[in-house]
Image: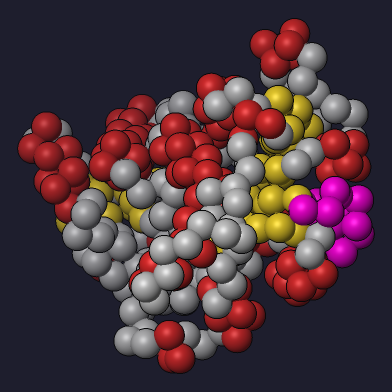
Amino acid sequence: MKIIAYGIRADEKPFLDKWSEENSDVEVISTGKLLDETTVDQAKGADGVVTYQQKPYTADVLDKLGRFGIKYLSLRNVGFDNVDVDAAKRNNIRVTNVPAYSPQAIAEFTVTQLMRLLRRTNTFDRKMANGDLRWAPDIADELNQMTVGVYATGRIGRAAIQIYKGFGAKVIAYDIYHNPELEKEGIYVDTPAELYAKADVISLHAPATKENEHMLDDAAFAQMKTGIYILNPARGILIDTDALIRALDSGKVAGAAIDTYEDEVGIFNSDFGSFDKIPDERLKNLLKRENVLVSPHIAFYTKRAVHNMVYYAMDANKSLIKTGKSDKLVDL
């Protein structure tokens, strides 16, 4: 049995090596390069492919995997919207993902960023770097006095809700699918508009779908309280960046923490050498603001999460090769 793992980062390599030792019946080939038209030939002779990337899995790549007789593609991440569905179906390629590598990691980071916004740590860090140790006028807000609106109550949303409750915040939520336990607590509102109108904080945990693209646009911001805080550790396309900038300029949005950005591919997880060389003016606009916290898609980035990404994907691929089954199959 042979599996090729693409896009293996240095932080993933120890976990992949350990998995290989524990699964001596599998020959594992790894490369740091992504799966694309220039590297797909390396998969010839393999029984399955494990990969992680933000680039598309194109028809050319999937057709070639099909010609190689490879029918199993296991992603080390949640999203599979970059898979050419028609090509996957045409080649009978079955796809698995890692639906939850650590909801707690993302939830903890989200709340951490909110606390930084509320306590104005970015402002104080910049002031102190210039020798200014005064308090005023940067007085803080308290989370226990606020209403947090959680948009989407899947694994990550529910983990975040528990932390928000621990701080004493009132939590309301919107989701087209109601979690039975949360339903009993009566925290759901009927519409996104109701969530926007009642919340002091909007915490986004929705997937990237066509319906959710730019769900926070000018119209959505107009429905929110003045002084709203926006948190997006989910997917960049959920927020219309231009609308967010306008809402920040007007004061409608008091602060934002974005771990995802709609044009992040090719930018996040890259070193440009200096701020001026970052090739995105809108992103630089956000980075310059004291009331905006931009992080390069790192909410997931913990040792536990990376371990799970590697192990769950490799286990799923091996299971497909051996049995044709996996509990992590996605419905393309």
Q: Of residues 19 and 137, which is closer to you in this image?
A: 137
Q: Is residue 221 magenta?
A: yes
Quadrant for the C terminus in the image: top right
Asked if residue 105 shows in the view, the reply is yes
Q: Which residue is located at x 63 percent, y 43 percent?
A: 141
Q: How is the image coloured?
A: secondary structure
50 relative to 157 in the view: left or right: left
* Residue 224 part of the magenta segment: yes
Q: Is residue 81 above or below residue 313?
A: below
Residue 93 in view: no
**Observer-nearest of 129 and 228:** 129
Locate residue 111, reporting x and y percent.
Answer: 52, 40
- Residue 204 in percent (x, y) is at 66, 45
* Residue occupying the far top of the picture: 184
> Is 192 displayed left or right of 103 in the figure?
right
Q: Which residues are magenta?
A: 211-227
Direction from residue 288 to residue 327 in the image, left or right: left
Q: Residue sitting at 14 percent across and 34 percent down?
A: 23
Residue that appears at 41% across and 55% down: 298
Picture mark count: 0
Screen quadrant of the N terminus: top left
Furthest residue toward bottom: 276
Q: Main secondary structure of the magenta part?
A: loop
x, y percentage for residue 276? Answer: 45, 91
Quadrant of residue 26 within the rendered picture: top left
**Which residue corresponds to the image point at 39% horizontal and 76% vertical from the top-left?**
130
